[in-house]
Amino acid sequence: MCGISGEVRFDGGVADMAAVSAMCDQLQRRGPDGSGGWQAGPVALGHRRLKIIDLTDAGAQPMVDAELGLTMVFNGIIYNYKELRAELEGVGYRFFSTSDTEVVLKAYHRWGAACVERFLGMFAFAVVERDSGRVVLARDRFGIKPLYLSRGPGRVRFASSLPALVRAGGVDTSIDPVALHHYMSFHAVVPAPRTILAGVGKLPPATVRTYEADGRESDWEYWRPVHERRAEFAGLDAGEWQERVLESLRVAVRRRMVADVPVGVLLSGGVDSSLVVGLLAEEGQRGLATFSIGFEAVGERSGDEFAYSDVIAETFGTDHHRLMVPSADVHAGLDGAVAAMSEPQVSHDAVAFYLLSQQVSQHVKVVQSGQGADEVMAGYDWYPPLDGVPAEQAVDVYARHFVDRPHGELATQLADRWMVTDDVSRALIAEHFARPGAETALDKALRLDSTIMLVDDPVKRVDNMTMAWGLEARVPFLDHEFVELAAAVPPELKLAHGGKGVLKDAARKVIPADVIDRPKGYFPVPAITDLHGDYLETVRAALHAPEARERGLFRTDYVERLLADPNSHRTTLGANQLWQVGLLELWLQRHGIR
């Protein structure tokens, strides 16, 4: 796990190493164990290192292989790197390190850009070809590892975070009105290639981008899951599906134990993370470090789920850590969480993950997480209404249950100059639903959520908050082979038992039923579920700040209406509208964007 940055020039100029170094400085917390830079004519690369695989200096980056004429920076982990290394050694490649970075480098030399199809892992990397001047960028199938880009006169820059690009300068930091519409309507998700800033984009997941020396560029989308029933699974009964799901997840969990340092688990007490712990115990893991976070209750709102996580810790004999965060620390952590966000993230889970990661990083450098199960196994409450819905009605039903506010309502909230004419968020949904490769209305929704919403909300949130403390989070439910299997599961098996039915039934073979049959929980942060006291004043100050007034994103009467009644105005899914608009201004101001 690391942070990467770089600049590529196409105008005959020399790459700006100072700008690349500035980006690296901004990425320091993603890689606290070392740094490096490399520059050759029109290309410069920078790297911040978190040592997980090959703890020696042989694994340092940027990594140069003079014999092959390749240089690269890499962020992530390739779980099958040892198998790939053995294959490459079998055809004559020699290795000078034991790192997965070098395996990626030599795999690129052997198979070109198609090497990404062989990787089991999460990654973002840049490879520079010495002889051709070609630069190749790539991102993993689910975009678990970020890669942001900005264009300037005769050059392109890239980095592992948006604020790093801003720090280097020369970025158009005006708001993108289409992205703003997505932020306000599509549950605060701004899909790639856009970001909230007009001058910054991001490489889409499952994409390889090639820059030729003259500036020509091309993209290759190398993976897209098919959400259809497959002939090879025809005739499977419910029990056989459970066995296949469980075995596939078992493999995914096993893969994610690859490391030269201990690996722990973030244990929420829900079925997903509990199942990860149970499968690791079946693999023979003893004394596994598990971590659960709790917050002080506010009124009748409980702030922890220790009753469930304690059951799992006791059942499997883990080295369990209960981490209780006082309410005073939550407010103090809010600024740190906003600073760690590469893009504005509305869910208050971000603050919880930030504070959890701060404490967990004092014990381990790698954890597994249950992230992604709801999006691939239909665990959310907007999925059941799609059951049996005809294809021509799917967009309407999905939008009615998921979109934060209808287009017409948004026109009464955004200032005129920021309001786009068309309902671009609904158009985004319709375009994705119309693509081939998804059979039912539920299949279409799960494909959209797992490849778009998941990438730019939950996955990004976990990456940003864990990496802010040099903690690597691995997500077995997003193993692409597991997701391909999950996509083929009949909808009725996923929707059973209120959602994730096939997973819950499979889990009964591993973990206690009390954890499976409990009501669905979320990461509870009572102090900011409703806005009061210091939290309300923080948001009020941000919305009344001179920068906010100058930007003028929202209608004044809308803002004052929210502030007058802070906790009554909710989105379709129940999120606090004041927090949504306030968080955007908090983020812009925290990162010095005017």
Image (cartoon, grey):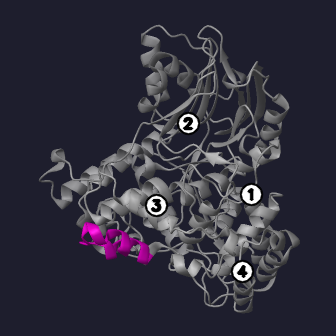
Within 10 angstroms of label 1, few (less than 14), some, or many (20 or more) residues?
A: some
Q: How many marks?
A: 4
Residue drawn at point x = 54 percent, y = 10 percent: 94
Give the secondary structure at mark 2. Answer: strand
* Label 4 close to label 1 by CB (< 8 Å): no
Q: Please, what is the three-letter code of the amino acid marked with disc 1?
A: Ser
Measure the C-alpha gap from mark 2 to mark 3. Answer: 31 Å
Q: Which residues are magenta?
A: 383-401
Residue drawn at point x = 77 percent, y = 79 percent: 535
Q: Which mark is residue 77?
A: 2
Q: Position of residue 154 (x, y in %)?
A: 73, 31
Quarter in which the N terminus is drawn: top right
Within 10 angstroms of label 2, few (less than 14), some, or many (20 or more) residues?
A: many
Give the secondary structure at mark 4. Answer: loop
Q: Mark 4 or mark 2, which has the lower sequence index?
A: 2
- Residue 382, located in which quarter of the rendered image? bottom left
